[in-house]
Amino acid sequence: MRIIDLRSDTLTKPTSLMWNKMASAEIGDDGYREDPTVRHLEELAADKLGFEAGLFVASGTMGNLVALLTHTQRGDEVFLEAESHIYYNEVGGVSVLANAQTCPIPGTKGKLTPELIKGYVRKPSINNPNPSLLCLENTSNRGGGSVTKPEEMRELVKCARGFGLKIHIDGARIFNAAVACKVDVKELVQGVDSVQFCLTKGLAAPMGSLLVGSQEFISRAAKWKKMLGGGFRQIGIMAAAGIVALETMIDRLEEDHVRAKKLAHGLSELPYLSVCSDEIETNIVIVEIISELITMKEFLAKLAENGIMAKDIGPTKVRFVTHKEINDDDINLVIERLSSK
Ligand code: TLP
């Protein structure tokens, strides 16, 4: 039986062009800033998002953590959505290493609005932590791949600036958002201080994320990266795949979005499931089991029996992610297999 693995878009494997470019990459010691392929990737990333400089980091988690360390002082308050990856899935690095106080704000589909933020940022007082940073996630992972659109971003930036907050975007899947909105990715990040995006999700590179911001911000961020043990050497081998990711893999994300919609439609016909988001915007589909009809244990067993892999992300919720290794037949098979038994 073909196993259909929809646990995450991190399962994507490098394309043959990536392998070729990795094998022939021009490399050097990045500790001396002498790896030309890394420099190229960092410049390409900064340019694509409209920032002065970029920094190649090991992972999305490292990119977000380096950003938090660079933006905040000990005891500062960081505002973020209550189910955001930084708050929910990054091992508490924001507290443990950045020593920041988090203010998790419950949003809708992982998204915040100026009204919500206004309810949480307090007036300056000797009793309160220093309000410092707003983190936004686009697309929102636990929000079912929901997209914060350019017009929504503009309002959020205005609101954050009104409170004197800096803004960091966890844009692990920012290109999915740009493709879904049919806009240049720059429009989604205009006016913010920093963005982290992943090369390893839908873009299919084997390693790495980019952190982009001002030259001054990136110079300070580079020291935090080094302190965290992120001092790279001949990492141009990996950066070469990242360049291919940025040059060739963005447009195809649309295919993942079309398949996610089809999958969501099929899953919504099953009596024992409800699809959390009626409108699938990108490549993530979160379903909720209807507990009167099926238990989580039974649903997970049913998936396993049918050679389908997905991720349980809460007591009643399961996440399916479409990606490069999943084709139209796979989506049909998932629906067929789950419908027939
Ligand atoms: N997300 C992964 C992990 O949760 C395992 C996934 O499968 O979705 N921000 C967002 C929004 C993310 O979804 C992720 C990874 C990260 C940051 C962290 O990236 P990595 O895994 O490179 O540290």
Image (spheres, rainbow, N blue to C red):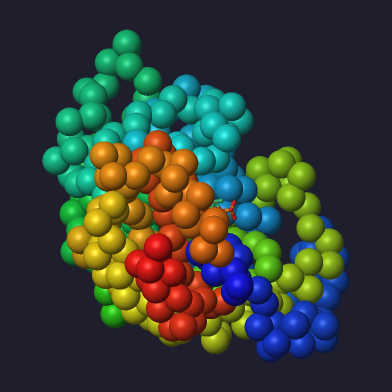
Q: For the point 17% across and 31% down, which residue is it? A: 119
Q: For the point 59% across and 27% down, which residue is it? A: 96
List the single residue furthest toward the top. Answer: 127
Corner quadrant of residue 133: top left
Q: Nearer the viewer, residue 96 or 256?
A: 256
Corner quadrant of residue 92: top right
Examine the rendered structure and indicate whether residue 96 appears above or below residue 42: above
Can residue 45 be seen here? Answer: no
Q: Nearer the viewer, residue 66 or 148?
A: 148
Residue 137, how many percent across, how many down? 38, 52
List the single residue furthest toward the left. Answer: 115
Number of numbered markers: 0
Can residue 299 be seen here? Answer: yes
Residue 307, how many percent across, how many down? 56, 64
Examine the rendered structure and indicate whether residue 94 appears above or below residue 64: above
Residue 47, how many percent across, how many down? 49, 75
List the single residue furthest toward the front. Answer: 341
In this picture, residue 52 sits left or right of residue 233: left
Q: What quarter of the picture does the C terminus occupy?
A: bottom left
Q: For the point 82% across and 83% down, which residue is it? A: 23
Q: What quarter of the picture does the N terminus occupy?
A: bottom right
Q: For the point 35% across and 29% down, which residue is it? A: 103
Q: Nearer the viewer, residue 302 or 107?
A: 302
In this picture, residue 232 sits left or right of residue 50: right
Residue 42, how many percent across, how many down? 61, 69
In this picture, residue 9 sits left or right of residue 36: left
